[in-house]
Image (spheres, rainbow, N blue to C red):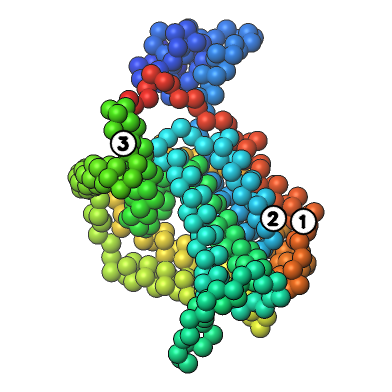
Amino acid sequence: MASFRSRGHDSPPNCGQSCPPNCGQSCRWGGTGGRGGTPQTPGRATPPAQRQHWHRHRPPLHPGAWWLWALSLGTAATRTTNPLLLALLITVSAYVVATRRPHAPWSRSYGAFVKLALAVLLVRLAFAVLLGSPIPGTHVLVHLPEVPLPHWAQGIRLGGKVTAEALVFALYDALRLATLLICVGAANALANPSRLLKSLPGALYELGVAVVVALTFAPHLIADVQRLRAARRLRGRHDNGVRGLLQVGLPVLEGALERSVALAAAMDARGYGRTAAVPPAVRRATAALTLGGLLGVCAGTYGLLTAEGGAYGLPVLLAGVAAALGGLWLGGRRTLRTRYRPDPWGARAWLVTASGVAVAALLTLAASRDPAALHPGVVPLVAPALPLWPAAAVLIGLLPALVTPAPEPTDPRKEPTT
């Protein structure tokens, strides 16, 4: 080891790192210039190739920071029905995804979430047209044939007049849910699910595996469909219509089944589901702390949302969170697992998380101080206005596009062929 350190290495040079020859850069996992490189001469400027090589060795952003940022933007979307602010939230999340989305199969699911959000908009508008709306209106757009319903279905109608006020109200309400879905899609496109699973506490590991498998099912399914459709087009076969969908669907289902069997075998080989022996007292304490913590969180949240519980809401919420964290810590003793190279939570992760939390906090404050600006009315029907300082608060969500590194370019020689 002394000979290694004399040559500028912190660990044996045979570390497997693919460094360019004689790059002179001291890598994190050992070696200067790969195998046989020479140390960099002190005082010399680092060439651009070496700076790019060092940039590739920087640790990536913690995936939990992306999820906290996206969920905070989704929380901000639930505090307003102003379509201009919601459109600004969608633009902010889309810009960050476009600039910081990595080149991976699971990152292609953002488009699917956008399509799901558009489907939510159309379904909500269709319900407003067919089932009516409790919002009164004077601007009648069309009269549909109304179907008479029995007396026990009072308050529900099929058909009748469709007013502009009812459609605008449905559009505002659906746009809020669509924005929330797009924010969740941004988290799926930016955060590596396997690295997020590695960062979970031991007590939530098994639950996290189920959630990660569910979240990665759709991206892999979309990637399989795109790959098979491209292969059919290269062979001169049609991939559109019902027939093309059926011929593509069967190989996709076969691939999903094979992937499931391989995943089950890998999980069994790695000891998934095996627990350590803990005393009965520890198990009872874990259950009591977890259940009591969840009840405290529910009671504290209810107290914060009501006017009568403002005095006890915050203390009960904090006590519930502390008890739940204690239960998770004790529950982690039953899980036999280790972390290989855990992801660090650095300054960039704090900045990304703080930007999302700031947007949610400022939108919540604006909703309490100026509810008319964040919840524009539809009776009478007026054009919504863009409030200035809430819009400026939403722009804080662009901070991750400035403080996080750009994704690594994809090597075309490593791209899979179809």
Q: Is residue 273 left or right of residue 212?
A: left
Q: Let me know if residue 12 appears in the view.
A: no
- State the SS at label 1: loop
Nearer the observer, disc 3 or disc 1? 3
Classify the position of the N terminus by image quarter.
Answer: top left
Q: Residue at x 59, y 13 (%)?
A: 48
The reply to whether discs 1 and 2 touch (Cβ–Cβ < 8 Å) is yes
Q: Earlier in the sequence, mark 3 or mark 1?
A: 3
The reply to whether discs 2 and 3 touch (Cβ–Cβ < 8 Å) is no
Amino acid type at mark 3? His
Q: Position of residue 211 (x, y in %)?
A: 37, 54
Amino acid type at mark 1? Leu
Q: Earlier in the sequence, mark 1 or mark 2?
A: 2
Q: Residue at x 53, y 42 (%)?
A: 345
Observer-nearest residue: 277 or 93?
93
Amino acid type at mark 2? Leu
Name the residue tied to disc 3.
238
Compared to 159, does 46 lie above or below? above
Q: CA distance from mark 2 to mark 3?
A: 42 Å
Q: Position of residue 207 (x, y in %)?
A: 35, 57
Q: Let me know if residue 94 appears in the view.
A: yes
- State the SS at label 2: helix
Q: Residues within 10 Å of mark 2 (few under 14, many from 20)?
A: many
